[in-house]
């Protein structure tokens, strides 16, 4: 059945318009968590760069059992609106309704329950169907964006002149949309983060309330594996990476003590330690401090001594991944950030992005354009 689901999934994705929910980065070709975070940060940094009085509010939304609340009849209506054939919509409706389900614990089974709501857990189609179910959850104001990676949703309010009305109305609209689509907001796990780099002004930020409950405001939030701080520094994130990577150095030493070949040690480092240190590196390394980089590089040097082999330093890895990611975006006209890469008249180099602050200059997209131009 999973093989057939993959065929249906591929057929659906090939049949969808390229403009369908451009800020949904999950389950799309040439999209990843890097793209999600890079778009979120670039939008934030660009707005902060445009005016000293500007600030950004991010609402990290959490849903309660999002996949289990899909209404099949509503989903098929939306699929029809997207242009999918009626017979395919009917098949999906049949696939989701009257599903027998039971739970096994050892040799004991529960009584069977028939379900007609939600998408089956572990099915190949479920994530894609959820993303299509929420495709119409988009921002209603030009001063807001809604960025999504599967059910990890962020409402971003670009605030100017201390006017938060559009942002608060956007959240109210999201709350109403959830009620209409049978999605339940988990207010206790929903958090708000404010990015305000203005040191001269003391502001009174309006609280966010959902269903009468005030949303907790935090100074850092872990989104898609990356700690985003209110000052957009990366010390907390890099400290977390270094701590986690150092724990794996113990296992690397144990493998060395067993006198395993250097190649095996190197493979272990690549799979378990380097993958930690370089996760989403394109979005945070450029703005990390010298101290942050040194702490991470010490882990790399320790690994070199243990494996008795040279491993790539983080700066080199960052540079190469920026180039690779940028080339993929340039070749993909449907990517929401493709417009940032425009060629000069010479046709050889890309136009540099305007940036007043070092934060924006050292972020992914300006750095990626610089890396591409240096590679040409």
Image (cartoon, rainbow, N blue to C red):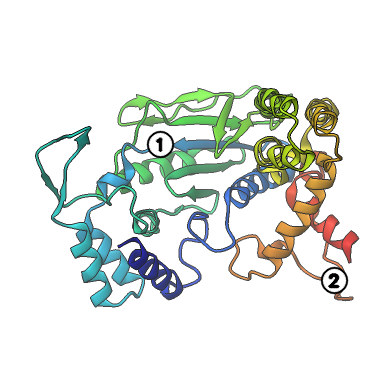
Rendered image quadrant of residue 258: top right
Q: Which percent across, then down, holds residue 68?
A: 27, 45
Q: Which residue is mark 1?
A: 62
Residue found at x 42% / y 26%:
215
On the image, the x and y values in percent for residue 249 come to: 71, 26
State the residue in front, 328 or 216: 328
Label 1: how many Cα within 10 Å (few below 14, some 14–19, many 20+): some
Q: Which mark is residue 344?
A: 2
Q: Determine whether, in the image, residue 46 is placed left or right of residue 205.
A: right
User: Is residue 183 rendered to the left or right of residue 195?
Assistant: left
Counting from the top left corner in percent of width and height, residue 287 is at: 77, 37
Q: Compare residues 288 and 336 and report the one nearer the observer.
A: 288
The quadrant in which the N terminus is found is bottom left
Is residue 224 at least partly visible in the picture?
yes
- Indicate the secondary structure of the residue bearing disc 1: loop
For the residues labelled 1 and 2, the Cα–Cα distance comes to 43 Å
Q: Earlier in the sequence, mark 1 or mark 2?
A: 1
């Amino acid at each position: 059945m999973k093989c057939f689901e993959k065929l249906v999934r591929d057929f659906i994705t090939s049949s969808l318009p390229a403009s369908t929910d451009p800020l949904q980065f999950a389950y799309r070709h040439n999209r990843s968590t890097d793209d999600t975070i890079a778009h979120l940060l670039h939008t934030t940094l660009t707005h902060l760069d445009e005016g000293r009085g500007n600030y950004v509010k991010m609402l990290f939304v959490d849903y309660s059992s999002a996949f289990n609340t899909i209404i099949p009849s509503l989903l098929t209506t939306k699929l029809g609106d997207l242009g999918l054939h009626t017979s395919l919509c009917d098949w999906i409706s049949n696939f989701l309704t009257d599903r027998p389900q039971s739970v096994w614990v050892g040799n004991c089974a529960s009584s069977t329950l028939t379900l007609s709501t939600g998408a089956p857990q572990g099915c190949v189609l479920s994530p894609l169907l959820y993303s299509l179910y929420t495709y119409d959850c988009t921002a209603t104001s030009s001063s807001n964006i809604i960025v999504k990676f599967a059910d990890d949703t962020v409402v971003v309010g670009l605030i100017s002149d201390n006017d938060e009305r559009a942002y608060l109305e956007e959240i109210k609209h999201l709350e109403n949309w959830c009620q209409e689509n049978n999605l339940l907001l988990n207010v206790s796990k929903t958090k708000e983060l404010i990015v305000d780099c203005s040191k001269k002004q003391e502001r009174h930020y309006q609280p966010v309330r959902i269903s009468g409950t005030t949303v907790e405001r935090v100074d850092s939030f872990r989104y898609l594996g990356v700690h985003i701080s209110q000052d957009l520094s990366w010390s907390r994130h890099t400290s977390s990476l270094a701590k986690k990577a150092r724990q794996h150095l113990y296992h690397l030493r144990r493998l060395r003590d067993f006198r395993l070949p250097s190649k095996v040690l190197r493979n272990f480092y690549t799979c378990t330690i380097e993958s930690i240190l370089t996760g989403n590196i394109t979005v945070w390394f450029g703005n990390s401090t010298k101290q942050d980089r040194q702490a991470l590089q010490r882990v790399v040097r320790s690994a070199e001594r243990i494996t008795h082999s040279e491993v790539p330093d983080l700066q080199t890895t960052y540079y190469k991944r920026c180039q690779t990611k940028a080339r993929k975006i340039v070749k993909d006209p449907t990517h929401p950030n493709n417009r940032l890469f425009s060629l000069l008249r010479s046709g050889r180099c890309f136009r540099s992005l305007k940036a007043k602050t070092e934060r924006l200059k050292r972020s992914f997209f300006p750095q990626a354009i610089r890396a591409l131009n240096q590679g040409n």
